[in-house]
Structures are given as C-alpha cells and as structure tokens.
Amino acid sequence: MKKNFYLMHLLCLAVLFSMTSGSNAQNFRNPIPTPYLMTGNSFAIDIGSATHNFDPNGFQTDINLNVSLPAYCYNQSGKNGMTYLGPTLIFNKGAELDFNFKNNLPSGINTTVHWHGLNIPAMMDGGPHEIILNGGNWTPDFTLIDNAQTVWYHTHLMDQTTDQVVRGLAGLIIVQDTTDPLEKLLPHSYGVNDFPIVIQDKGFVLDTTTKPPTAIAIQAGGKPGNGPYTLINGVVGGVLRVAPEMIRLRILNGSARKMFNIGLSTQFKNPTTFADMNMIATGGGYIDKPRQVKTTLMSTGDRREFVIDFSVYANGDTVYMSNLPVPADANYGTTPGNALMAFVVDHSLSSADPVTSIPATLLPSYSLAPGPVFKERTKRLMGGSGQSSGHGTMWTIDSIPMDMMMINDTVLVNTKERWTIINETGNAHPFHIHKVQFQIVEYKGMMGTDTTVKTYTYPNLPDELIGYKDVQLIRANATMVFEARFDFFPSPLMAEESYMYHCHILPHEDTSMMHQFVVVDSVDFFTGILSEPDTEQLTVFLNQAKDQLTFNSEFTKPGQLSFYDLNGRLLQQLDITSLGNSAIPLQHLPKGVVIVVFTSEKHRYVQKLNLN
C-alpha cells in the first residue's frame, strides 16, 4: 500500500510544532500543510479520490474530525501527496504549456478543470462545456500571456460545481514573470516566506450515536449548508510557524458560499487592535502601490496578496487571523468569533534571501486599459424569495436562466467594453467573469463592510476596488461599472466555445445565476449583429481607379465610419457629416478583407469588403 506522504508531512510538523510553539497557540495544534509544487511546461495530473484527515491532532472538541474521510484531490501523476485540494502550479509568463488530466474519480462522475483568472482560448478555459468524462483524459495546451498574479484552478461542471469544490477539487496557481524585478523585491521563497492560504468552510455528516458525534463524510451536494468549520489548506485549528521577517500571504477564499472578514491581531477573542497588512496584489496581479489595511472582506473566489512584517514580534509570539463580523447582506452563514488560524513567530527560522522592505511603487504606470469603449452592456443580478429552481432559491441574471446552448453575449475580439452590473437583490453577490481582468470605474452603494451608501469613481477608488479583478463583491442593491479589454483568442460563433460570467457563490451559480459569452472576430461579430434591431446591410462601392470608396445611401445625418480587420482590430475611424456625400480614400487601409461599419445615433450599417 502506498504511503500517504501528505499525512506523514502533517504528523512530522505536528511533532516539531509541539516542541516549539508558543503557549498562546495551544488551541491551534494542526500545522498548516503547504501543497507541493508542480513546475515546468508539461503537467500530468490525476483527478481522483482519497481519504483525508481534517483534524489530525484533535483540535475540535464538539465533534470528532480526527478521522479519515473520503475526499477529492488533484495529484501529479504517479504521486499521492495531496489527499484534499491540489498541488500549487507554477506557470511562467510566455511559456507554452500543455496538460494531461486523467479523471480517476469514482465511477460515473464527470468533471472539468477551469483556469480561474487566466486569459486563454475558450476551448481551453475548462468551463461547463469542456467535460472530462469519467475514466477519460483532457489535454489542453495554451501559451500563457498573463502577468504575474495568483489565480486558481477548480472544477466547473454544470450543476455540480458546488459538490465537487466542497469535496476538494481546487488548487492555487502562481503566475511568475522572471523579467519583472518585483519578483526579487518581494518575498518569493515558496513555503518559507511566501505561503498559500486557502480559506474554506466545511460541514460534515455526523454519526450522532457517538459522543462527541463523529464525522463520517463531507457535507456536500448542491446546497451543502452553512459549513460551521473553517479550514486553512485543508485542516481546522491550523497554525503556521513563520520567520521574523517580511512574509507574503497569497489568500484565496475558496469557499462555496461564505465571505470572510479577516484581520491579524495578537488578541485571540474580540480583537480591537490589528496589524498592518500591506496589500500588494488583487486576483489580477500587482496594484499601483502597497496599501496598508487593517481588515479585508474576502468574497468567494477572490484572491489577495499581503506582505506582513513579522519582525516586530518576539520569539514565540502568536498572531491570529481574526474572524470578524460580516455585513448582514453578505452573510451566508458566517459566524464571527474564534480566530481562523494562528501564526507563531519562530526566531530559529529564516529565508535565504529575506526581504527587509517592500517597494513604495508596484505599478508606476497603473491606469485604465487603453482604447475607446466599443460597446456597453448592462446586467441585472436578480432573484430571491418566491423564486425556486427546485434546488432552493432561483437566482438569475436578467431573469434568464442559464442555458448551455444560449449565447447571451457576443463580444468583438480586441475591443474594450464597459459593463454595468446592477444588483437588484437584498443579498451581496461576488460577480465573476472568465477570460478578462476588469477595472472598476464606478461603484454606487454599500461597499466592503461599510453600511452607508456612497459613490466611488475612478481614479478616486478605495482599496477594496483598486486593481485588476475577475471577482468583485457587489453589496445589496449596489451598482458596479467596469471596463475590460477582450483581447486575443477569437472563437467561432458557437455556444460550445463560450466563456462564463456568474455569481461566485457556487450554489447560486449552480441554480442559474450564470450566463455565457463568445469572443469572435469581426466577420462573425458583424454578421451576428445584422440580426439585431436597427442594423442593416451597408452598400459600398469600390472604385479602384480612384482608390476610394463611395456609398449608396440617402442617410444624411452625421455618424462614425469604422474599418476593422478580421481579428477585430480597428484600422481606421472617421467622423462623417453625411454618408451619402462621402468618398473615402483607401491608401490608409491594408489589402484583404475588411469590415465597414457606419454608426449614426442608434442605427448601424455593416458590410464586408475585399480590398484585394
């Protein structure tokens, strides 16, 4: 029988911890495991099941979690080091990556692997369409174009995302850019001064005939309940020994439904003073400058990176990750109180290249993504009491349930769009979109843990809203406006090659609060909009002798004439007084097929033209 290296690692750390931990952390007795790394350009990963002990040193006293429970996990093929979650994957910017995933889950269980936060082709995105059949393989490959950031991978099977994430199918990805000097100026020694912190809530099915009741299974299913037990990297009562230096924490809220308001304090219960947490990155990478925060509200699916100065503490001091109150509209079962985990400062530890200070500037040229806004869209988050899906409350976008064969939005590649997301419900929802990292330009309503209604506009945004994001919590009845560039990787106009946008409360996603969009080239995009109201065919005359274009149109109102290539790139844009009286020279346009678009007020004319 193969040895369980993951459990052996926990036990060895437990022995070491029992000899060196501070007295204030006695209650936190499970050393927090650090998932092993997978590096390189080729990854062979098995998706399977195992048994996992969430409480190997008996932290819980109300129930017995010190038992082996069935769970799901990812592992490098041929290894069994993970019995819950997956190894941390290291991707290098610019690398050509290829994968071989093998579905070894119990019989009849299909799955997917979604790259949450990456800009990759739709067929490689791992959403509900890219199903890995039980016993089968999935072999995606793509070139990584994203900047340095912390993202994650997890299952995204239609109607089964909640169940499979709760059972353990999730893991972190660290995107590195070896050409970026910030890589060396910030803590970067994985497991030494750079730690993954995956927060999850969990519920368990109990055998109530034992005293205390004994957990016999993870409480999963489509609606797994409030999950009163909080895990850090797969254990309850977790403790992490850290060196007295600058420590980087890559924090992911990987829960199915709960938001967590966290802070760091030496006070175990009811803390009133908090350490400075230097936020350096959001889910989309580095922000403009380190921002000191005392507390932060982490929504499901979100990642944030912090650098904490532990050199100010004495040997053996304990710093707790506090579990602080969450606003009522964002509370999906979170009970504030006891700390989520403990850090014990150990002066016998050190890194080979400790960081003594962090740069004052991270992205000196941070600004909104370039280019004009090509299209604006409005989405309404809807649902609540009185609407039912059969699995509980029905949550929707624009009152339209999720349909795998419906394309809800068609986006022209290499353009920038502005989306307005209106939360019409009395509950907070973390909005997530695949493929792109967006920037918030306006937010109206309650934000973070604030209970007052305010309006924030770029560039005067609070820390909560700054940076590139793929997830943002929108509080009850609030409105968020963001801009994003949909660059690269056009696909055919097919639902099977869609990206998703949805609420990242997984039971909401599984009960229809999800839509899909396709990113297409200019031919598919403008062909598609010909079926929309107020769009007509444009008649264009090519006069090669005079090297110019003329138009057969009686439309005399002013408008804008645009030329696009087949990849959606804007070639030329002109303000026109009257289309019917215009002769447009061709010398600024390339040979080949172009798309000609004339827009006046709310009316559009479109035509494909070959300039060969």
Image (cartoon, rainbow, N blue to C red):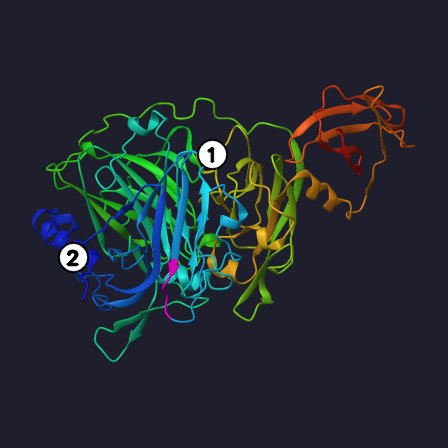
Does 105 appear in magenta?
A: yes
Query: Crowding at label 1, few (<14), some or many (≥20) Cα neighbours within 10 Å?
Result: some
Q: Residue at x 39, y 55 (%)?
A: 101
Range covered by the magenta-colored residues: 102-106
In the rendered image, is residue 229 in sight? Answer: yes
For residue 466, the mark is 1
Q: Seen in the image, is 142 located left or right of residue 576?
A: left
Of the two numbered discs 1 and 2 in the rendering, the one whose residue sits closer to the viewer: 2
Pick the front one: 347 or 462: 347
- Amino acid type, label 2: Met
Disc 1/disc 2 C-alpha distance (Å): 41 Å
Split into 4 quadrants, where in the image is the C terminus?
Answer: top right
Could you tell me how many numbered marks the image carries?
2
Query: Crowding at label 2, few (<14), some or many (≥20) Cα neighbours within 10 Å?
Result: few
Report the residue that reaches farthest toward the right. Answer: 554
For residue 482, the mark is none
Rendered view: 37 above or below 163: above
Q: Seen in the image, is 221 located left or right of residue 499?
A: left
Pick the front one: 252 or 551: 551
Q: Quick one: SS at disc 2? A: helix
Q: Position of residue 4 (x, y in %)?
A: 20, 60
Report the residue that reaches farthest toward the left. Answer: 19
Q: Residue at x 54, y 63 (%)?
A: 511
In the rendered image, is residue 29 in sight? Answer: no
- Amino acid type, label 1: Ile
Q: Position of residue 557 (x, y in %)?
A: 87, 29
Q: Quick one: SS at disc 1? A: loop
Q: Position of residue 271 (x, y in %)?
A: 28, 45
Report the residue that reaches farthest toward the bottom. Answer: 209
Rendered view: 209 above or below 559: below
> Which residue is denoted by mark 2 in the rendering?
8
